[in-house]
Image: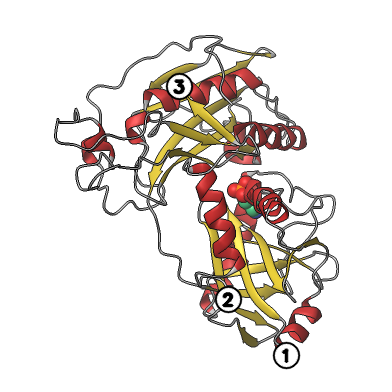
Amino acid sequence: MSLTQSFHIPVQRAYPSRLHEVDWENLEFGKYFTDHMLICDYEDGQWKEPQIIPFGDFRLSPVALALHYGQTIFEGMKAFRMDVRPTGPSKNIPRSPERTNVCPSDDEPPVRPGDGSINIFRPEKHYDRMVLTCERMCMPAVPREVFIEGLHQLIDLDRNWVPGEEGSALYIRPFMIATEARLRVKVSESYRFAIVASPTGNYFQQPVRVKVERDFVRAARGGTGYAKCGGNYGASMYPTQKAKEEGYDQVLWTDGQTHRYIEESGAMNVFFVLDGTLVTPPLSDSILDGVTRDSLLKLAQRDGIPIAERPVDVEELKEAFKKGTITEAFGAGTAAVISPIGVIGIDGNDYTLPASGTGSARSIGAQLKDALDNIRYGREADTEEWNFIVK
Ligand SMILES: *Cc1c(COP(=O)(O)O)cnc(C)c1O
């Protein structure tokens, strides 16, 4: 899938580039930002012309409504540099962004034509989710072409920032804030939409310890759990910090009414392998509809792995640990892709997943991650039409 350049967004170029300031060997998540950002303001009932400008601070009134009453939303997606597969020895192959700037010398082995292009993963799905989020937060949806074309032109301009190492990507953060200067509780009449991007590395995923949360609530029925809004995160920090004090890395949320059913974890949807079936809780208004969740389910279906979207009772998990029928558990989200769970704490007892499960090379989690990466890095046909190639 690709778009023709239907409209051109004015660009104010950043000079000089900050590419050389990046420590490419140690890409700490969310630390470095590309040279440019896109901004688009909403005023007087309409969206103004988007602009691409150097990455930098915003000027904002201290009484901008976003700062007081929480009209802030975001998305998180990734762009990948599609696999550059050498036909000769690999040592001279352009891999990191600095090196892609260098003209290939004669002794470098040829690369397959068309490789090394940039792929934004499922931008349309992220756009649709942002529209839903905007609706829930009484915020105007940015026009589709501003989002899609804006992404396209921004990532094209900053394409040297997309890392080339296996497992690395450019993390893209579209977001919107209420900018009207007013202290009264009201729906803002002005907004800023922006897109920033940050290179991320390939992180080794240590299995995490999660605590099943039986007291605190992330999202209630009728609340904003399905929306990607800042407030959901603000509210989850205290319970997460408590869980950390007890020696866990993350909270595994249960439903707000009965605390019996698993919902999701931190910023990730959650999967279990129970009796060989890949199980994940069904979507509801208290669970975020993750693009990674959706992609993994579709790939599992394609590859003949049995799947079930059904409620997961905490008691069932305890039983499954007793009987040994739970073999894997993992979180799934854009940032870490798949995050293996090593221990689940339930009501003061720690249950350990078998080491042969998630994270091991033959696990369903690892198999699905490979299938996803093969599409995103262009090693396999994009059968689902998920890739959006930046021309
Ligand atoms: C963003 C997010 C996810 C994961 O969604 P992806 O689209 O896969 O990145 C899961 N849960 C919550 C609460 C989130 O905010």
187 with respect to 357 (left or right): right
Are dots 3 and 1 in contact, CB under 8 Å? no
Query: Residue 72: x percent and y percent?
Result: 61, 38
Q: Which residue is mark 2?
A: 357
Query: Residue 186: x percent and y percent?
Result: 73, 31
Task: Report helix, strand or loop for mark 2.
Answer: loop
Q: Quadrant of the N terminus?
A: top right
Amino acid type, mark 1: Lys
Q: Nearer the viewer, mark 3 or mark 1?
A: 3
- Residue in view at x 42 percent, y 52 percent: 167
Q: Which residue is mark 3?
A: 391
Amino acid type, mark 2: Gly
Whether residue 267 is visible: no
Colouring of the image: secondary structure
Amino acid type, mark 3: Lys
Q: Quadrant of the C terminus?
A: top left
Question: In the displayed structure, would residue 133 be above or below residue 220?
Answer: above
Q: Is mark 2 within 8 Å of ligand 1?
A: no
Q: Between marks 2 and 3, how big is the CA–CA gap?
A: 40 Å
Task: Report helix, strand or loop for mark 3.
Answer: loop
Tell me, for residue 322, which label it has, or none.
1
Question: In the displayed structure, would residue 114 be above or below residue 91?
Answer: above
Q: Nearer the viewer, mark 1 or mark 2?
A: 2
Q: Nearer the viewer, residue 356 or 192?
A: 356
275 with respect to 19 (left or right): right
Q: Is mark 3 within 8 Å of ligand 1?
A: no
Are dots 2 and 3 in contact, CB under 8 Å? no
